[in-house]
Amino acid sequence: MKYLLSLAFSTAILSSTYATTISIDISGTISSVSGSYAPDLFTGQAVTASFSYNTNELAATSADTTPSLDPGHEYTSFYDFESPPYGGTVNIPSISATFTSNSAAVVVNDDLFIDGADLDGALASGTYDWIEILASTTVDGTTGYPADGEEWTLAIFGPTDWITDGSLIPDDLPSSYTAILLGIEFDDFEEEIGIVFVEIGSMTVVPEPSSCALLLGVAALAIIGIRRK
């Protein structure tokens, strides 16, 4: 359950939301394309995306709360949800392309180490808390990793005091975090055949934080090291 990739990030300030269902709307532009996504996708194309996930673990269709220690595929817990309503959609208006997930998941990563070299220096090497909201049309391959399909992922990185129980999905976002968006295509042999990065220009979270404002600073990021079951 993993994917190792590159993408774009935005750093945001947000107060606690304490909600069960959280929806996030994103707009941005493609900053990098490789493999099977080209030539249909190219840098500069506008992208809009919507992700929705549930912080109520009892709403999950299945759950794995036993941490994985598999090198390169570590995680703390993993929750599958029905899609729709959870998961994501991604739109590229210039070519009338729309991705809609048929499966959804939330991955919880509590106090896991990330090598700064794997992040192309966008984040320093160190330990972070983060969640991944997965929107996927993939099926599992022979080793249980993604095969034959496409995934779009919104990952939100925070400080290590954000997630206090790694077996649970956090009910709110941290006061300061880094959000990352990326798309990946897989072939029948579980190989990544295409990667696209999106530079996030705006991001709206519903329910809104009490300040009703999300302060965003946008920058480019290359990341290697997120996972998919």
Image: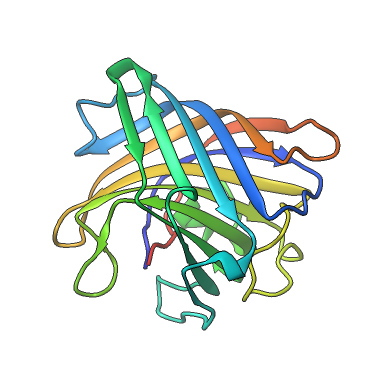
Q: In which quarter of the image is the C terminus?
A: bottom left
Q: Which residue lies furthest to the top in this view?
A: 94
Residue 56 lies left or right of residue 17; in this view the side is left
Confirm whether residue 196 shows in the render.
yes
Q: In this view, does 38 lie above or below 71?
A: above
Residue 209 percent across, percent down from the top left: 79, 40
Q: Pinpoint residue 190: horizontal percent, then vertical percent.
A: 21, 61
Q: Name which residue lies at 51% across and 64% down.
A: 107
Q: Position of residue 224 (x, y in %)?
A: 42, 54
Query: Does the image show residue 222?
Result: no
Residue at (77% x, 48% y) in the render: 17
Seen in the picture, residue 91 relative to 13 is either above or below; the reply is: above
Look at the image and name its color scheme: rainbow
**Residue 39 percent coordinates (x, y):** 19, 26
The image quarter containing residue 226 is bottom left
Quadrant of the frame with the N terminus: bottom left
Count of all numbered marks drawn on residues in the image: 0
Position of residue 139 in the picture relative to residue 101 (left or right) = left
Which residue appears at 27% of the width and 56% of the height?
138
Q: Is residue 133 above or below residue 78?
A: above
Pick the front one: 117 or 42: 42
Q: Residue furthest left?
A: 188
- Which residue occupies the foreground of this view, 36 or 229? 229
